[in-house]
Image (spheres, grey):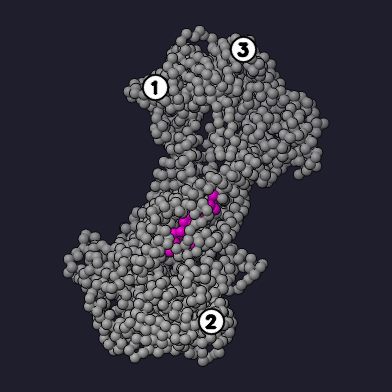
């Protein structure tokens, strides 16, 4: 029998993507070693194009090193992606689990609640939230979480509703185990596969959404992130292509890799069941 | 694309209709064996029904798919052998040619009528697809031909029925549609892959009858794949027994059924439960479990504007279960037998009625159930949490009920021993066990709670006959050793006959007949019971007494 | 009749969802620290307290929050979304003026993304494992991973500046005063880029979804039945696989409506498209809360309606729904 | 600093006027950025509103690029000896866009009733007025309470737009339905506004200047994205870019296109100066040494050249060099971080282990990318000397609100001159304007009786020499005390297609009527 792990590692694209993500994560973690100086520091003349020996990815309008911004930005972008996904998962899994397990009126109320959140166009909602709280890394994370939990909650609810009728869950009921314990030990671990897959895609979506917010000028001014770099460089596309090109490529590669890993996980965790979610 | 013209005139006596010659179907790397079937040979003849019998994994369906040219590409392929259809090799034909053979010369019906039809097309449209294979037909003619086909299948109102979508039809009706589709172009060979396995006995009987009737009328050959010797006894002219990809025995129906030669065949036939086996016991006076007048109505949630629908699943059902007794709860699907079992177990709520355990009444859903009533589930693959070690699965219940951990563990080992498993199973995960073993674990789990009542819901339905027999024997052993009472829910009267002392026959939420097993079988009172008994496949076959070689 | 009552039921539910969104949006927006009056007044220069008090009274901002909410909801039920702080005009009029542009953009983007996406996905599924499959898969992933606004900017550079094929901004050539068919062509000319860019992302999604869905359906029993009937493979793909594979796509089209409408904020900004996405962002910057609230409600209503339409479509495609639901 | 293709507008207009006769016809394509909230200039005076509505409405006077007073709706004017009575002679045969005749009645209504109620800046100016009377249909006489030499600078179209009395008198001005279809006397009439898309004005055939305007139409496109605006100009979809429409380095690039020109003229009336605004109420901004430390930490040349791409000049004081009251040789705010560190040391603000001496809040001004970038630069420079800025990013509304509520430590702000220090400058310095709620009041908390006195005398003195002396004293004081960190005087460059002629002809540049603008074939 093939274990999910070996299935995953049999998927070449997913493995390459995972390696890529590992490199990006390492770069992010080692940002202070590679570029010990603050990425905000003006280290050279403004608008220097990329050059070997000079600034690898050029400098921006204030003479800041794009490459330094890129590795420091990786930290923030990944952090925003991970933390907002974690929060969304917490809310989504919580609500979805309760709704799916208990069903009936509880389910009805929670799902109406979820529906309200899901109906509001997500980016508009996120923009409003960030604007109201003031653009900061916290408000961005909160806004992204708030708009992304409903899909998790629906997914988890569906899984719980299916698994709740599974015989091993009923067998635990028959053994007299309490509901919370059944949810935590019998249902949740078995519902995690699609949730993990969704989570990887959510990290990708969160990074994209952060870049969109930054593009609209709603990035955290204290934190350099990829979105912020693109947002700041968007008006200079013509004059200094490298300023938005490299962070743009960084986003594309990261999101691509996250998607590939997500797909790989999906295939590995559900070999018989192609997920319906793209 | 020239249609293959295999007229009956071409088939001479010299050729069997289909000859499987040295067929080997290779499985992809990483499968549990290298070949699905290995160098098998047998023949199918026109005008005869040949049953291919074997347990799951014997390779019987794979052969059918090979004949149809429908092996899952590209992983599974024929690596050797010939499939001679009227003397010419099907394997030598290109895909395009095979397509004209399929559905016209050779057609096939499947096990699951519920999923075998496209849900988005009317049945008429789906039959029309076959009829129009060789070119479009005028609308009127098409409808007439479909109407006639459906009428031939004894389907009601064939004129309007053809405009129905599959979901409106019952399983039996859908299987008739499938047969109509398969027979639309008068094939020479019909391959039926477990066509009745998913159906209730009475429906099964009708379908078997239909297949036989159509086979006779068209003089075609039928390759009938089944695992059930009862069915074989009903329908077969010729039998091919397969085990793990090999043909182990072949012969006429009398020869194989009544004097099987190969040990595997003998084992299988010995394991077949029949109505001839009757268990009996004298129950004690005090009922352990007493069910009185319980009612349950399923209501679809009524929306503001949608109509409410109600299904009476249980209509005032009452029975008593005594110590050391096995009661069989039998009935067809939808009879309410599972609902009843689950209600007793408080897995589903009841509307009214009383359930008393050991004279003590238990309340509504969610109230803590006395641990001495336990449940054995139907699907051994679904009833164990795949992420929990067996040891944990067996001890979590007792520990929760206050049994010290050490004691719970020793009790679990003991129970594993009772169900015939090694104590080393404790550290393993469910996926490391076979279906039969898992069902034993499921029973062991129930036993660790030291129950006095066991409710077994279709506990052996998903198992192969040989395994089924072992599990039934285990349950009987447990009853004898521990004095446990068992409520045994099953759709299979033959299984009920082997183990149950008393029977409750359910239909549409009501108990229509109740009494000692033998009495009911010998002298059924209700019409329904009679029809059920009548429909039991192979009821007229009195299997030979075979000593079992282990 | 069944379908009609289903539709009415859905509409009633939708109205409740929209009311709930109204309350939610109202509360969220009123949580803004500070005083909108100061902002409105501050814009026009020096301000005195008396002027601000008058303004506050005029806008009803001196009432308790609950009363304000009540007034707002009462208006909402009557289709009155209040007055814009900034423009002084009724919010509903302001939004209605912008709505057609957004509808044109989102509907056309949905249409091409579904059409092309399903086609590409179907092709990938049929040619599974070939170069075409890989190419479609790679492209889809790439479109999926590229930020919308970035693609938009690149497209402007390439197609407006370098090639000069399409205008860089706006919905009409205001200086040309086109009429009739030429006006329509002019709008189409402006529409192509934003529609395609907005559509590309969803096209990628639909392509992947269609492929996955078709592969899943192709494993189903009835497809085996169709093969056993000896039907040609292309026919099976079209009539049996694709049709069933479209069901989850319809569901998804409903789910992603909100996402698509959100995406218009970015696209409308990049392409200067005069729709409500851009209006939302502008209103936010100007703290024109009544307009923002209105947009929340109108866009949510669009999502609800779109969902009802997809559900309805589902019932048309899938005969089982009527009974099962 | 790069050599720029900058031609003084006046020289250019003169040159072109000589070179060719104006051609009639054509559509001028402009960009309205951001989209104005309304076009009723009396009710709203935001930049875009001025830009668009400046073609519809007119004021009594206009001002040349040298700030000389030019006729507008008033063809001539006299000021009494004592500086108390101003008499305006109006143009003849002026009609409103709806065909009603224009008269002194409209002027009296606008100045005495309409504007004081809805126009904060005009209300301030009209506070000096004792009486306004119509002397016949074409003459208006205004009597002041006291001499106010800046009074004559207060009549350009955005400071005092003349609105039609027959439409507004006796109505609720703000909710008047006519606000949607503004009626003015200007050379262009409102035609169509597709919100979010474009505003179109058409030629006023009955304009009082014979033969003008030359253009048939003016279209203001709404293009929200700066990069798209640059592309729009490059692809010839718009003819003119205003300062701030595109990034400053894009200006350089676009100006270098073969068919494009650029000019810095047309901002003389506003002459904005950007500065670092300290909240003098809070520690440590209340310490002059801290403020000086900030001064010396910032390289104004860098800001002018790198951030404003040469389209700005370092500012050394509160008045623009173009002002007649400008004092030369103010002490230079030299870039010298060591000096800053010494000052901070002196204050006892010593660096901690991370090199941070103190942390203050910085409210980012989000007007454009350039301002945001300037904030980033300031933050980095202050970080170098150990002052850590905690940035609050917000939208313009939020910024204005925080500023109005005095809820900030430091921010960047810019101040318009409005022609005379008494009109534009004074308001940010005098204690009488310590009004909470308005971002354009004295929000820094500056309360210096000496400054109050000097400015009040300078505002009412009738002799120019006297005023120059007083304003010199004012300039010296605020620079010595470093109440504001003056950064740069911004030149908002206008880039336009060469074929557009006579584009900038007055001190309000593109906001003016454009009656003289024509397009060469």
Tell whether A2 sits left or right of B335: left
User: Is B525 placed above or below C55 here?
Assistant: above
Q: Which residue is mark 2?
A: D101
Label 2, secondary structure: give it: loop
Residue B412's disc number: 1
Q: What type of secondary structure mainly makes up the magenta span?
A: helix
The secondary element bearing badge 1 is classed as helix
Query: Is the residue under label 2 in contact with that under label 1 (CB below 8 Å)?
Result: no
User: Which quadrant would residue D206 be assigned to in this image?
Assistant: bottom right
Q: Which mark is residue B521?
A: 3
Do callouts 3 and 2 point to residues on the same chain?
no
Q: Residues within 10 Å of mark 1 (few under 14, many from 20)?
A: many
Question: Left or right: B348 with respect to B59?
Answer: left
Circle nearer the viewer, 3 or 1: 3
**Disc 3: CA contacts within 10 A as few (<14), some (14-19) or many (>=20):** some
- The magenta span reads C279-304
Looking at the image, which is closer to me, D139 or D211? D139
- Mark toward the start of the polypeptide (3 vs 1): 1
Q: Residue at x 36, y 76 (%)?
A: D124
Residue density around tag 2, few if under 14, some if 14–19, many if 20 or more, within 10 Å = some
Q: Position of residue B204 (x, y in %)?
A: 66, 24
User: Mark 3–mark 2 contact, CB under 8 Å?
Assistant: no
Q: Is residue A123 visible?
A: no
Helix, strand or loop at mark 3: helix
Total marks in image:
3
């Amino acid at each position: 029998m093939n274990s999910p792990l070996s299935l995953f590692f049999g998927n070449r694209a997913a493995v390459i993507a995972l390696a890529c993500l590992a490199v990006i994560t390492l770069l992010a973690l080692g940002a202070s070693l590679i570029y010990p100086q603050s990425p905000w520091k003006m280290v050279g003349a403004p608008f220097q194009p990329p050059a070997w020996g000079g600034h690898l990815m050029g400098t921006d309008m204030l003479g800041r090193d794009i490459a330094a911004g890129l590795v420091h930005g990786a930290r923030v972008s990944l952090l925003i992606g991970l933390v907002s996904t974690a929060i969304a998962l917490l809310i989504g899994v919580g609500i979805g689990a309760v709704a799916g397990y208990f069903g009936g009126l509880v389910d009805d109320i929670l799902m109406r609640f979820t529906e309200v959140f899901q109906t509001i166009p997500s980016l508009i909602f996120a923009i409003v939230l960030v604007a109201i709280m003031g653009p900061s890394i916290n408000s961005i994370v909160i806004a992204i979480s708030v708009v992304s939990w409903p899909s998790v909650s629906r997914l988890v609810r569906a899984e719980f509703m299916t698994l709740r009728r599974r015989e091993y869950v009923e067998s635990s009921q028959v053994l007299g185990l309490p509901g919370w314990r059944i949810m935590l030990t019998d249902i949740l671990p078995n519902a995690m596969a699609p949730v993990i897959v969704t989570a990887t895609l959510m990290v990708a979506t969160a990074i994209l959404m952060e870049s969109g917010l930054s593009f609209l000028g709603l990035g955290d001014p204290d934190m350099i992130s990829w979105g912020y770099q693109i947002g700041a460089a968007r008006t200079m596309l013509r004059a200094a292509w490298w300023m938005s090109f490299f962070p743009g490529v960084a986003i594309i590669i990261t999101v691509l890799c996250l998607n590939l890993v997500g797909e790989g996980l999906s295939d590995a965790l559900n070999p018989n069941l192609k997920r319906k979610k793209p | 694309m020239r249609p293959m013209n295999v007229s009956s005139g071409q088939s001479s006596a010299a050729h069997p209709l289909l000859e499987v010659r040295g067929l080997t179907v290779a499985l992809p790397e990483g499968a549990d064996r290298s070949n699905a079937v290995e160098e098998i040979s047998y023949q199918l003849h026109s005008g005869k029904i040949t049953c291919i019998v074997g347990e799951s994994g014997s390779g019987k369906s794979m052969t059918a798919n090979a004949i149809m040219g429908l092996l899952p590409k590209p992983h599974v392929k024929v690596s050797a052998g010939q499939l001679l259809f009227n003397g010419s090799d099907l394997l030598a034909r290109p895909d395009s040619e095979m397509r004209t053979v399929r559905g016209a010369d050779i057609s096939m019906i499947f096990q699951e009528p519920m999923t075998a039809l496209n849900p988005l097309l009317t049945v008429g449209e789906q039959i029309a697809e076959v009829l129009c294979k060789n070119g479009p037909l005028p609308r009127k003619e098409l409808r007439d031909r479909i109407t006639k086909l459906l009428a031939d299948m004894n389907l009601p109102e064939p004129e309007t029925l053809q405009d129905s979508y599959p979901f409106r039809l019952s399983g039996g009706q859908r299987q008739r549609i499938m047969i109509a589709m398969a027979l639309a172009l008068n094939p020479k060979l019909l391959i039926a892959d477990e066509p009745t396995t998913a159906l209730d006995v009475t429906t099964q009987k009708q379908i078997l009858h239909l297949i036989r009737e159509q086979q006779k009328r068209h003089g075609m050959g039928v390759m009938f794949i089944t695992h059930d010797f009862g069915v074989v006894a009903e329908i077969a002219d010729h039998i091919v027994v397969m085990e793990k990809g090999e043909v182990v025995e072949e012969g006429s129906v009398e020869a194989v059924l009544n004097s099987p030669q190969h040990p595997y065949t003998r084992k299988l036939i010995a394991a077949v439960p029949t109505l001839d086996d009757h268990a009996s016991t004298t129950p004690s006076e005090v009922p352990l479990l007493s069910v009185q007048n319980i009612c349950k109505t399923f209501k679809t949630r009524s929306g503001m504007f949608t109509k409410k629908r109600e299904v009476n699943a249980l209509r005032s059902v009452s029975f008593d279960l005594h110590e050391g007794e096995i009661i069989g709860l039998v009935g067809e699907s939808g009879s309410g037998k599972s609902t009843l079992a689950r209600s007793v177990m408080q897995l589903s709520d009841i509307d009214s009625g009383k359930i008393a355990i050991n004279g003590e009444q238990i309340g509504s859903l969610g109230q803590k159930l006395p641990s001495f009533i336990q449940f054995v589930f139907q699907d051994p693959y679904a009833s164990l949490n795949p992420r929990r070690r067996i040891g944990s699965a067996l001890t979590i219940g007792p520990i929760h009920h206050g049994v010290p951990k050490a004691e719970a563990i020793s009790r679990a080992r003991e129970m594993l021993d009772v169900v015939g498993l090694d104590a080393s199973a404790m550290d393993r995960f469910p996926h490391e066990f076979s279906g039969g073993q898992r069902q034993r674990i499921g029973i062991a789990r129930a036993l660790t709670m030291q129950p006095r009542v066991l409710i077994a819901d279709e506990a052996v339905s998903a198992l192969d006959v040989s395994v089924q027999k072992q599990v039934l024997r285990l349950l009987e052993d447990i009853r004898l050793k521990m004095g446990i009472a068992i409520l045994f829910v099953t759709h299979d009267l033959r299984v009920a006959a082997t183990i149950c002392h008393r029977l409750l026959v359910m239909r549409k939420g009501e108990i229509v007949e109740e009494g000692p097993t033998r009495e009911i079988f010998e002298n059924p009172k209700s019409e329904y019971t009679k029809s059920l008994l009548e429909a039991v496949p192979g009821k007229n076959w009195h299997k030979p007494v075979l000593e079992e070689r282990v | 009749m069944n379908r009609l009552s289903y539709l009415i039921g859905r509409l009633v539910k939708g109205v409740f969802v929209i009311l709930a969104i109204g309350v939610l949006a109202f509360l969220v927006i009123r949580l803004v620290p500070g005083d909108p009056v100061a902002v409105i007044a501050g814009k026009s220069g020096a301000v005195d307290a008396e002027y601000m008090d008058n303004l506050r009274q005029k806008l009803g901002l001196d009432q308790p929050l609950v009363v304000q909410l009540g007034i707002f909801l009462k208006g909402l039920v009557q289709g009155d979304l209040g007055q814009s702080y900034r423009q002084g005009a009724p919010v509903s009029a302001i939004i209605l003026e912008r709505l057609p542009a957004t509808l044109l953009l989102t509907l056309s983007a949905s249409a091409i993304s579904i059409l092309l996406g399903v086609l590409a996905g179907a092709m990938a599924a049929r040619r599974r494992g070939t170069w075409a499959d890989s190419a479609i898969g790679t492209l889809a992933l790439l479109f999926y991973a590229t930020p919308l606004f970035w693609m938009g900017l690149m497209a402007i550079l390439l197609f407006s500046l370098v090639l000069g094929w399409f205008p860089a901004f706006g919905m009409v050539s205001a200086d040309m005063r086109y009429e009739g068919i030429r006006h329509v062509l002019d709008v189409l000319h402006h529409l192509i880029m934003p529609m395609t860019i907005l559509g590309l992302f969803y096209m990628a999604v639909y392509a992947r979804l269609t492929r996955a869905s078709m592969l899943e359906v192709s494993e189903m029993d009835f497809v085996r039945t169709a093969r056993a009937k000896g039907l040609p493979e292309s026919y099976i793909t079209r009539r049996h696989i694709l049709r069933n594979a479209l069901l989850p796509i319809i569901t998804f089209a409903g789910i992603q409506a909100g996402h698509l409408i959100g995406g218009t904020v970015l696209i409308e900004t990049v392409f200067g498209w005069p729709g409500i996405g851009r209006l939302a962002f502008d209103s936010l910057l100007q703290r024109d809360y009544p307009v923002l609230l209105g947009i929340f409600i109108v866009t949510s209503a669009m999502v609800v309606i779109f969902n009802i339409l997809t559900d309805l479509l589902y019932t048309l495609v899938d005969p089982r729904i009527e009974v099962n639901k | 600093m790069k050599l720029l293709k900058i031609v003084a507008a006046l020289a250019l207009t003169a040159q072109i006027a000589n070179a060719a006769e104006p051609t009639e016809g054509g559509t001028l394509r402009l960009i309205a950025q951001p989209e104005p909230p309304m076009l009723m200039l009396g009710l709203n005076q935001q930049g875009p509103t001025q830009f668009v509505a400046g073609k519809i409405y007119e004021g009594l006077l206009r001002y040349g690029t040298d700030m000389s007073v030019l006729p507008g709706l008033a063809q001539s004017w006299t000021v009494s000896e004592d500086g108390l009575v101003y008499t305006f002679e109006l143009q003849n045969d002026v009609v409103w866009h709806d065909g009603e005749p224009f008269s002194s009645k409209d002027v009296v209504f606008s100045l005495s009733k309409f504007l004081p109620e809805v126009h904060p800046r005009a209300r301030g100016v009209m506070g000096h007025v004792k009486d306004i009377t119509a002397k016949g249909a074409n003459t208006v006489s205004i009597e002041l309470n006291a001499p106010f030499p800046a009074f004559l600078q207060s009549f350009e179209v955005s400071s005092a737009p003349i609105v039609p009395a027959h439409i507004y008198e006796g109505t609720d001005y703000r909710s008047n339905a006519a606000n949607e279809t503004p009626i003015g006397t200007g050379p262009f009439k409102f035609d169509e506004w597709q919100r979010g898309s474009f505003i179109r004005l058409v030629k006023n055939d009955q304009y009082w200047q014979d033969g003008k305007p030359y253009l048939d139409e003016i279209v203001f496109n709404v293009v929200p994205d700066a990069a798209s605006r640059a592309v729009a100009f490059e692809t010839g979809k718009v003819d003119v870019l205003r300062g701030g429409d595109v990034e400053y380095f894009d200006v350089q690039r676009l100006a270098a296109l073969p068919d494009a020109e650029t000019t810095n003229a047309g901002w003389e009336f506003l002459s904005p100066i950007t500065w670092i605004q300290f909240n003098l109420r809070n520690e440590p901004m209340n310490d002059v040494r801290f403020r000086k430390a900030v001064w010396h930490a910032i390289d104004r040349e860098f800001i002018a050249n790198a951030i404003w791409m040469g389209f700005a000049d370092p500012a050394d004081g509160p008045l623009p060099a173009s002002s007649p009251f400008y004092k030369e040789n103010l002490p230079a705010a030299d870039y010298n971080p060591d000096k800053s560190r010494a000052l901070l040391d002196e204050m006892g603000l010593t660096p901690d282990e991370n090199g941070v001496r103190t942390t203050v809040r910085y409210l980012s001004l989000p007007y454009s990318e350039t301002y945001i970038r300037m904030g980033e630069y300031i933050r980095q420079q202050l970080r170098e000397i150990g002052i850590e800025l905690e940035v609050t990013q917000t939208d313009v509304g939020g910024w204005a609100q925080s500023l109005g509520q005095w809820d900030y430590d430091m921010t960047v702000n810019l101040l318009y001159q409005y022609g005379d220090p008494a009109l534009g400058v004074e308001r940010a310095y005098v204690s009488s304007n310590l009004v909470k709620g308005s971002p354009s009041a004295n929000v820094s908390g500056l309360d210096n009786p000496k400054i109050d006195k000097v400015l009040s005398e300078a505002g009412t003195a009738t002799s120019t020499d006297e005023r120059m002396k007083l304003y010199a004293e004012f300039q010296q004081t605020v620079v010595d005390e470093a109440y504001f960190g003056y950064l740069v005087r911004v030149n908002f460059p206008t880039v336009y297609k060469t074929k557009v002629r006579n584009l900038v002809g007055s001190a309000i540049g593109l906001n003016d009527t454009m009656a003289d603008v024509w397009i060469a074939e």
